[in-house]
Amino acid sequence: MITGARAVLGPVPACHVDPFLLAQGQTPETYGYIAIVYPGPWCDVLFFRGQTIRYAGRLRQHHRFLTREGVVRETYLAYRSDPSTAVWLYTAQAEPVRAFLSTFYYVPLLKMDLQLMSRKQRARLFGALRIPRCLIERALLQAEPPLVDLQICEAAEGLPRPPFSLSQGILSLYDIDRNQEMMREMRHAAASGREPPAEEEKRGPAEAGPVHPPPVPPAPVHEHPSRVALFGALLRSFRKAATQILGRPYQELEEKAEREIRLEDPEFRADALGEGNAEKVLEIIRFVVDHAGMLRRAVVRFSAATLVAEFYSANHEKLKSLGLVETVEECYKHLNA
């Protein structure tokens, strides 16, 4: 499925194999992932090391995010009887597996449909970009099996042409250093306003220690909250993170967003959400990200995308019962556009 990975098993109809038991049969030093491909196509990915599943992600044509293992298990059980659902097992070296995993929490610098670009446009794009360390990805989920080509490169004088076809699929370019820097800034901003240690400020992003994926929240053990409580908690989390990043301008942006929403829904109040309009919190998040200052926009976008992904993962069943799964997915897709 990804460059450098070896298909050990697959495609196997999902009704004949349990992907969670496959991981338990691996040797301790093995790196790899298990792909559960659903009709559509889209897929869930279980990243494992040895016999332990470390991370789970959901991969669609235009967006992806980390999720909980329990969400993947529920989806697998719902689709396992569909003859189009198949399971693949891949092993690989640690580096390509980590590169693939990083695309689930990195924000792409560019994302485009290759079929909409001419050969000359693609050549001009690669010649013009200057990214010190870049992850180039081509995703083609319609292929059998779904294909994700990856290449890490250093580019001082334009990006080198990758060794895979650029005629079809979705091409994404990730600025590795910038994404690692944004993750550290977001973590520091979320830690009650704590500033990074002076010695870490002086070091480059590649020297300040490893950057790990954002934590996926555990499954809630209490009853699902109401729609107001659900989206109210999301708004409070976003306010805290965005205020730490943007400072005083955040309040002005939220007030502008609220005025825009009231043009269509005069009853909407951000501080007094109702069961009929609480999901419009997502519109506030989108407005703030789209209108944030240029120098801080990428950081607040990354923070918002992470919060929405965690919100979606932790409350998937509640969102499904409310008919809001696609609404949240569209917001996440917009934040990663």
Image (cartoon, rainbow, N blue to C red):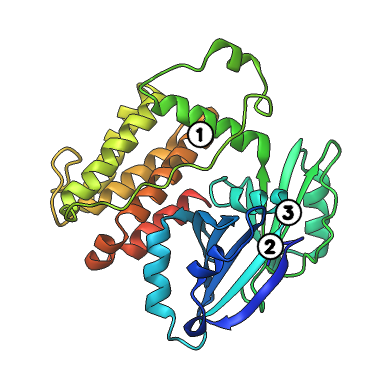
Does residue 189 lie above or below 283 as drawn?
Answer: above
Q: Is residue 61 visible?
A: no
Does residue 332 lie above or below 236 as drawn?
Answer: below
Does residue 229 lie above or below 144 as drawn?
Answer: above
Which quadrant is home to the N terminus? Answer: bottom right
Please, which residue is most extreme toward the bottom here?
A: 83
The crowding category of the residue bearing disc 2, from other C-alpha atoms within 10 Å (few below 14, some 14 to 19, many at least 20), is many
Q: Secondary structure at mark 3?
A: loop
The crowding category of the residue bearing disc 3, from other C-alpha atoms within 10 Å (few below 14, some 14 to 19, many at least 20), is few
Q: Amino acid at mark 3?
A: Gln
Q: Is residue 57 visible?
A: yes
Q: In the visual, does 88 lie left or right of 161?
A: left
Q: Amino acid at mark 2?
A: Thr
Mark 1 or mark 3, earlier in chain: 3
- Please give the residue where the numbered disc 2 appears in the rendered image: 91
Mark 1 or mark 2, earlier in chain: 2
Nearest the viewer among 190 and 15 is: 15
Residue 140 placement (x, y as % from top left): 66, 69
Q: Which tag is nearer the camera, tag 1 or tag 3?
A: 3
Tag count: 3
Q: Secondary structure at mark 1?
A: helix
Residue at image location 47% in from the left, 84% down from the top: 15
Q: Amino acid at mark 1?
A: Val
Q: Which tag is nearer the camera, tag 1 or tag 2?
A: 2
Please, which residue is most extreme toward the top here?
A: 198
Location of residue 234 by image quarter: top left
- Please give the residue where the numbered disc 1 appears in the rendered image: 299
Label at residue 93: 3
Residue 85 placement (x, y as % from top left): 51, 81
Q: Are marks 3 and 2 in contact (CB under 8 Å)?
A: no
